[in-house]
Image: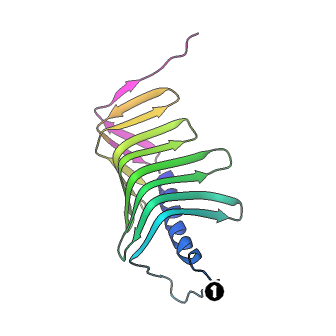
Amino acid sequence: MAVKIFAVILLLLIMEITFLSTKEPVTLEIKHPKLNFSDITFENLDAFLFTPEGLRGELKSSKTLIYKDHDELYDIYAILYFSDHNDTLKAKKAHYKGNILHLTDDITYRSNNTFLLKSDDLVYNIDTEVAVSQTPFLLEQNGSKATGNHLVYDAIKREVKAEDVVFTIEEEDQ
């Protein structure tokens, strides 16, 4: 679910920054339900998502390329602000096409400083809300660690399936 929110925020931020990059104020009347922007490049993008409740998210990337059929982002750092915690996502590269967000190279997802996921390849289907990593991964939560070679996370069912898993659980001294 959090990755889906990041994907939606990412698209909204890219669209928002496109309009904010003009020097003069522009009034835009949308007469078509879909607008297609293509062949746009942003260097050192720092975009924010504001809602009536205030700042909701922030996205930074060293380079963002928007094409007609897909988007690419490099050196991504995204923060999603909640009332009681923040979620962060870092990756070297993201490829977004249709309903698929593909993150690669040094991916780190942290939620509320209690949950951590690290991998080098993660594919997230926005429609089904399923994330799949077919490379070695590390999960950490409250001092416990799990490593494995294949991970499937279903955000709707809140189910994690993994293969070749090794668990390490830390116990507190009494």
Report the residue at 40% width, 69% height from top.
Answer: 65
- Quadrant of the frame with the C terminus: top right
Q: Position of residue 46 (x, y in %)?
A: 54, 61
> Position of 31 compared to 165: left or right?
right
The outermost residue toward the top is: 174
Q: Does dot 1 land on a helix, a strand or a loop?
A: loop
Q: Is residue 1 visible?
A: no
Disc 1 packing (10 Å; few <14; some 14–19; many ≥20): few
Q: Is residue 44 visible?
A: yes
Q: Position of residue 168 (x, y in %)?
A: 40, 23
The color scheme shown is rainbow
The outermost residue toward the right is: 53
Report the residue at 47% width, 38% height from top.
Answer: 116
Q: Position of residue 30 (x, y in %)?
A: 56, 86
Given residues 84 and 61, the one toward you in this image is: 61
- Looking at the rendered structure, the kind of residue marked 1 is Thr
Q: Position of residue 105 (x, y in %)?
A: 34, 48
Compared to residue 55, the image places residue 40 above or below, namely below
> Position of 113 compared to 35: left or right?
right
Question: Toward which corner of the image does residue 173 lie, by quadrant?
Answer: top right
On whether residue 171 falls in the magenta region, the answer is yes
Compared to residue 3, the image places residue 173 above or below, namely above
Region in magenta? 151-174
Compared to residue 53, the image places residue 15 above or below, namely below
Report the residue at 44% width, 44% height from top.
Answer: 108
Question: Toward which corner of the image does residue 99 lie, by quadrant?
Answer: bottom left
Can you identify the residue that label 1 sits on?
27
On whether residue 129 falls in the magenta region, the answer is no
Q: How many dots with numbers?
A: 1
> Position of 52 compared to 49: left or right?
right
